[in-house]
Image (cartoon, rainbow, N blue to C red):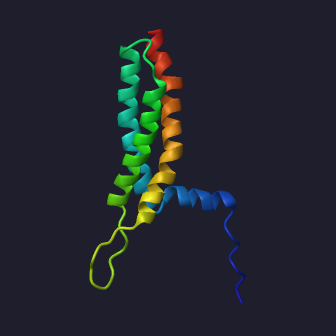
């Protein structure tokens, strides 16, 4: 009898998951990232062009907008596998996946744009 293959380490498993993400998760992240970046750059441009503007309501609108639009795009982009009839169906779970992907992406994009990029423009 041959010796059983030892299990992969935690790092090897995570590295494999990073290189081969499930398509629905990848699509949810990409949809939310695209929406967050486009809207975030517009928000940053407004903040730079209109000094002293009240940004709190706009940032709240940005967060809600990215979550809603990202969830809808994920719902439209992530479909269930085709069944025997070949009918492509959508699921509300795809929108929930988009919601859960949007929350950290919104936060990271806001931090990136307003804590890293904005000081570069403000000092120059």
Q: Residue furthest top?
A: 124
Work out which residue is located at the far bottom of the displayed protein and give it: 1
Q: Please state, as top left, top right, bottom left or bottom right, where the C terminus lies in the image.
A: top left
Residue 54 location, x and y as percent?
45, 19
> Where residue 118 sits in the image (x, y, percent)?
47, 20
- Residue shown at 47% from the left, 17% from the top: 120
Q: Is residue 101 left or right of residue 30?
A: right
Most foreground residue, 120 or 91:
91
Q: Is residue 3 above or below residue 27?
A: below
Q: Residue 84: x percent and y percent?
A: 31, 85
Residue 112 image point, x, y percent: 50, 30
Of 71 and 61, the residue lying toward us: 61
| Residue 23 visible to the viewer | no
Look at the picture and state if 40 lies above or below 71.
above
Q: Nearer the viewer, residue 18 or 79?
A: 79
Residue drawn at the location 27% of the way across and 77% of the way down: 87
In the image, farthest residue toward the left: 86
25 lies above or below 88? above
Q: Is residue 100 shown to the viewer in this render?
A: yes
Question: Which of the 4 image quarters holds residue 83?
Answer: bottom left
> How many labels were placed on the picture?
0
Question: In terms of image quadrants, where is residue 16?
Answer: bottom right
Q: Nearer the viewer, residue 9 or 63?
A: 63
Q: Quadrant of the N terminus?
A: bottom right
Residue at point 53%, 31% (across, down): 111
Q: Residue 1 vs residue 12: left or right?
A: right
Image point 46% across, 63% down: which residue?
A: 22
């Amino acid at each position: 009898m041959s010796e059983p293959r030892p299990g992969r380490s935690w790092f090897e498993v995570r590295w494999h998951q990073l290189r081969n993400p499930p398509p629905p998760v990848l699509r949810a992240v990409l949809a939310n990232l695209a929406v967050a970046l486009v809207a975030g750059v517009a928000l940053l441009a407004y903040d730079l062009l209109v000094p002293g503007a009240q940004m709190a309501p706009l940032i709240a609108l940005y967060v809600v907008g990215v979550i809603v639009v990202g969830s809808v795009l994920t719902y439209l982009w992530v479909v269930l596998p085709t069944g025997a009839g070949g009918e492509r169906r959508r699921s509300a779970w795809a929108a929930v996946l988009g919601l859960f992907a949007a929350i950290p992406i919104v936060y990271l994009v806001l931090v990136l744009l307003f804590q890293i990029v904005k000081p570069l423009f403000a000092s120059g």
